[in-house]
Amino acid sequence: MSERASFDIRRMPGFVAIALATFLVLYAPIVTLVIYSFNAGMSVALWEGFSWRWYEAAMHNQQIQDAAVRSVIVASFASVFATVLATMAALGTTRVRPFRGQTTIYALINQPLMVPEIVTGVALLIVFATVKQATGYSGLGYLILAHTAFCIPFAYLPIRARLEGLDRSLETAAADLYATPWRAFRRVTLPLMMPGIVAGAMLAFVISLDDVVITEFVKSAGQDTLPTYMLGQLRRAVTPEINAISTVLLFISVAIVSAFFVLNRKKA
Amino acid sequence: MTESEISIRVSGVTKTFGEGASAFHALSDVSVDIRKNEFFTLLGPSGCGKTTLLRLIAGFDHPTSGRIELDGEDISQLAPFQRPVNTVFQSYALFPHMTVAQNIGFGLEMLDRPKAEVAATVAQMLSLVRMEALADRRTDQISGGQQQRVALARALAPHPKVLLLDEPLSALDYKLRKDMQIELKRLQSETGITFVFVTHDQEEALTMSDRIAVMNQGTILQIGSPREIYDRPEQRFVADFIGDSNFLEAELLTGGASGRLRLGSGHEIEASVPEGMTAPRRVSVSIRPEHAALTSGAEDAALTGTLKEIVYFGTDTHYHVALGSGGSFIVRRQNSRGVTETLEPGAAVGISLGPRSVQVLRD
């Protein structure tokens, strides 16, 4: 064998041990949670045999049903709105000549990634309280609006990446072949950026589905989403029912994020 | 050339990128008339402005000043989709989300032609470029040469008045390029469309074009048939860029279409002189290596010198001669079997020049 040409971290002492410990800390709790969701007993720490009972209980729990439906409604609207806005933002920041303040625009679009969620939550609470008082409206609109706002950067990043990888000469060719700017966009640019848009929407959906902090501040009475309902339950008795809901949420998220990676891997 | 024979007229076109001190003049006061049904080539090194001129004709850029006419109509300010002009891109720019047939039909579809007409034209184009069997393939599932033909068919399908080709053969290997050169000539004569072809390859330009415009540094130096450009280059750059050339200093004695010239050796000879050049004056002349021949004696030789080197090239042989009057000169001789080399380096040789072999340059 020839001498190693470059630094290889796998040869460093303790590499294997550190890697194993990291995976253990990351996944052991999740695996435990999933296992105990099938516990026949009342405990989340004492195994009493396999059973689907907590899944059945969760399915028949009216509060959980309501929270789940609410979560899906908010996530659907928020991800669609965020994706539309993010698509427009991506077009506006890549399909134009470089302009002054472009970096500032990037920073503003990605603001939710930088501002602590708790700060946004408090700020929205104050603003929405005023609006609620003035209008009397207290529906899901506030949650949808708030979720749309923090989902935008998650939708924006994959869409922009896709657009930047797109060969500009294709749009030139469309214009050369008698396509008006709108038709060139409809027939060439939009279909080619579609994988980015779908990926962005999926990411936004998962992020919205998962949110606790901002939802907790913004929701009105009786507007629990699945995560805030779970949080509320944990303050009282903890039963494997929580494990069951968590497991379902986990699988939905993993499925969507996997689909996101598969879509993103498709070359431009 | 009468007005009705002109397809594209470029008059006084200047294109400047950037402003102030950093401004770059891609084209400076370029004028050219391109005839209908002509295979016209813009030839020059990279950065000479040939692609910029093509983009101005296509409408991807607009001239800083000057105008571009198509069939007598000013099109300088029209958007690309408003011009009956199509382009074959260097990168082909095929739509990756469409099949071969959909790519070819795209232009007609954008012109809102009836579906039946689109289908009929696509079928016709597929057979024109011999791609019938691959109509339903995606464009990333076909070879580079096939992509090239699809790009051609796509640009020809709407039957444009002018087809622009931006170095379309540069990505192909040598053999394929040769085939495509013949194919392009065939397509041009079969469709009767004006072709404006951009290349930096002099051989491609010479073999395919009806006329060539040689460009350098944003200007057109000379326009003419391949034979005129090769045999009668009027500027040093043209003589140097296309083929090989010997350059000599000489004294122009009388002007006119064929003037008299005194070479450094004192020999007087007839030469072709660019229009409008007055005599007497000091000039540079260009002589193609194959337009000169070696003579053993010095009697009727135009130039004399010492043979320095003999380089064998297979099809021909190059003789490098150090001239008695200073400078060096290359003579090219076609090889044939049964002729043995009698000359050796160091021999005193004469160089005879044919009657129309000396071209006076403007610079």
Image (cartoon, rainbow, N blue to C red):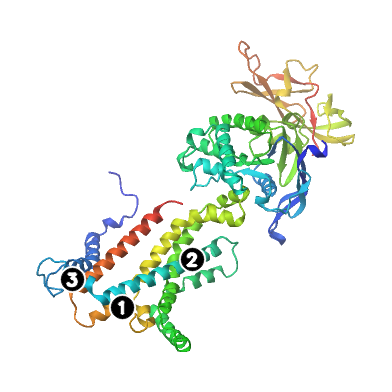
Is B9 situated left or right of A221 in this image? right
Q: What amino acid is labelled 3 in the image?
A: Trp
| Disc 3, SS | helix
Disc 1: which chain? A
Among numbered discs 3 and 2, the one appearing first in the sequence: 3
Q: Nearer the viewer, residue B59 or A174?
A: A174
Q: What amino acid is labelled 2 in the image?
A: Val
Q: Are marks 3 and 1 on the same chain?
A: yes
Q: Which mark is residue A54?
A: 3
Compared with A208, B101 (above or below) is above
Residue A26 picture location, percent across and down: 25, 67
Q: Quadrant of the N terminus of chain A?
A: top left
Spatial distance from mark 3 to mark 1, Cα to Cα? 19 Å
Q: Nearer the viewer, residue B324 or B163?
A: B163
Q: Nearer the viewer, residue A77 or B92?
A: A77
Residue at 58% x, 32% y: name it.
B128
Q: Which residue is mark 1?
A: A228
Residue A215 picture location, percent across and down: 36, 78
Q: Which residue is mark 2?
A: A84
